[in-house]
Image: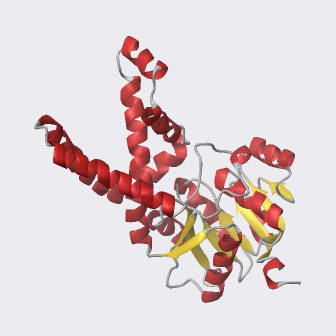
Amino acid sequence: MAENTVPVFDTLAVIGPGLIGSSVLRRAQAEGNLARKLIAVDQSPDVCARVAELGIADEVTTDAAAAAAQADCVMLCVPVGAMGPVAAQVVPAMKPGAILTDVGSTKVSVIEAISPSLRADVPYVPTHPMAGTEFSGPDAGLADLFENRWCLITPLDCTTAEALQKVRTLWERCGARLREMTPAHHDRVCAIVSHLPHLLAFTICGTADDLASETRSEVLDFAASGFRDFTRIAASDPIMWRDIFLSNREALLEMLGRFMEDAQAMARAIRWEDSDYIVDRIERGRKIRKSLIENKQA
């Protein structure tokens, strides 16, 4: 058997088969080289029933500890605010040598929440696959969701080389591009490229919703592409994004402050008809868009 067809893990337990978790399960089924057995876990019987209907796991259960006891890798795909409590459930049940990993969109707070539950014989590899859509739940998953997207890995001092390599291989087989960085650097990067854009999208949609009824109806009737793009982002899961904002509040508030200063500078340029400044800002935006397209991230 070719080396890249041998499953990375014998049994993979995905805790929280939402957009990310169910996409991992679908990819694992499609490729057959992530794990021999797939277990999906969710506290909701309705979600479990839907996962069973979709047939994207070999076993579906609400018992996280029982699933963890079988697994060679436990992947936490729950909202970042739930990472700590779920880790406290699953880590004590894990086999010695089994790997714990997570897909949380913030890393410092998630690592702090999980750390009290860690064991010396259970290596932990924090990750963040930077892929997604505005949809959520097990039906939202896509086997190719991670294709050519970045997965950021933030290994700790206690992360073993073997565990790190296995998790890297899992994400490579999901189609992802990998980058390693420190948890704090991860949170600052994601605050500007992901968390702040979502905050702005939720806010501008709220502003539109607060307009007088006649104007608001026109906003909804005549929404141009710019506003439509904001509404796509704003359709994202509210609980997940509440947790992300609160978990990464320091880095997010720093980036929001910098944005507000830049927005005020643009307001001054418009007020005083500073055409050069306005054109420069627009040109910088165009260059960023071009770079994203060239980097296959758009």
Q: Relative to residue 202, is residue 90 drawn left or right? A: right
Q: Position of residue 272 (x, y in %)?
A: 10, 38
Q: Nearer the viewer, residue 152 or 37?
A: 152
Report the number of discs. 0
Q: Relative to residue 286, is residue 24 drawn left or right? A: right
Considering every residue shown, the one lying at the far bottom of the view is 161
Q: Position of residue 253 (x, y in %)?
A: 31, 53
Q: Nearer the viewer, residue 165 or 122?
A: 165
Q: Residue at x 42, y 32 (%)?
A: 205
Q: Position of residue 63 (x, y in %)?
A: 77, 57
Q: Residue at x 55, y 66 (%)?
A: 150
Q: Relative to residue 151, is residue 278 drawn left or right? A: left
Q: Position of residue 112 (x, y in %)?
A: 47, 68
State the colouring used for the structure image: secondary structure
Residue 265 visible in the snapshot: no
Considering every residue shown, the one lying at the far left of the view is 272
Task: Please tell me whether residue 239 is drawn above or below residue 23 in the rendered image.
Answer: above
Q: Nearer the viewer, residue 201 or 282?
A: 282
Quarter holding the N terminus? bottom right
Task: Please tell me whether residue 260 is drawn above or below residue 31 in the rendered image.
Answer: above
Q: Quadrant of residue 230?
A: top left
Q: Residue at x 25, y 54 (%)?
A: 258
Residue 296 visible in the snapshot: yes
Q: Residue at x 58, y 63 (%)?
A: 149
Q: Nearer the viewer, residue 80 or 167?
A: 167
Q: Quadrant of residue 31?
A: bottom right
Considering every residue shown, the one lying at the far right of the view is 1
